[in-house]
Amino acid sequence: MPLLNLVIILIVVGVGLYLVNRYIPKTILNTVIVVAVCVWVLQSVGLWSDVTNLRLKR
């Protein structure tokens, strides 16, 4: 995915969150949307498999 498309989509999501917060402030909804966007960005740049394969050692 080209970087310009990624930036445009992030701007649209940000404006959407702003409008939702302006009229219906809900913290849980914001958290879900931010997590979903973070996962989507990681998938689009190819880093999601690195995150899911991450193992913590003791």
Image (cartoon, helix red, strand yellow):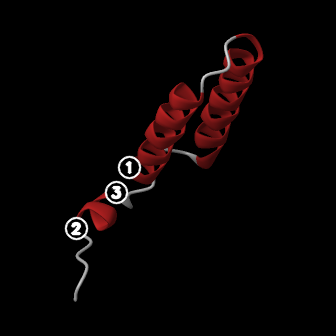
Which residue is the site of mark 3? 48
Left or right relative to 55: residue 39: right
Q: Earlier in the sequence, mark 3 or mark 1?
A: 1
What is the distance, in whole Å, between disc 3 and disc 2 at their CAs? Answer: 9 Å
Q: Earlier in the sequence, mark 2 or mark 1?
A: 1
Which residue is the site of mark 2? 53
Which residue is the site of mark 1? 43
Which amino acid lies under the numbered mark 1 shown in the image of this protein?
A: Gln
Query: Which residue in the rendered view is the most extreme toward the top?
Result: 23
Q: Are marks 2 and 1 in contact (CB under 8 Å)?
A: no
Identify the element where label 2 is drawn: loop
| Quadrant of the image containing the C terminus | bottom left
> What residue lies at 55% left-to-right and 45% top-to-bottom?
2
> What residue lies at 69% left-to-right and 31% top-to-bottom?
14
Disc 3 packing (10 Å; few <14; some 14–19; many ≥20): some
Q: Earlier in the sequence, mark 3 or mark 2?
A: 3
Identify the element where label 3 is drawn: helix
Query: Percent position (x, y) of residue 3?
Result: 61, 48
Q: Is residue 57 above or below residue 16?
A: below
Which amino acid lies under the numbered mark 2 shown in the image of this protein?
A: Asn
Give the mark count: 3
Left or right relative to 38: residue 14: right
Query: Percent position (x, y) of residue 22?
Result: 77, 17
Disc 1 packing (10 Å; few <14; some 14–19; many ≥20): some
Identify the element where label 1 is drawn: helix
Q: Are marks 3 and 1 in contact (CB under 8 Å)?
A: yes
Q: Nearer the viewer, mark 2 or mark 1?
A: 2
Query: Percent position (x, y) of residue 24?
Result: 67, 13
Which amino acid lies under the numbered mark 3 shown in the image of this protein?
A: Trp
Q: Is residue 48 above or below residue 56?
A: above
Foreground pick, 54 / 9: 54
Foreground pick, 18 / 28: 28
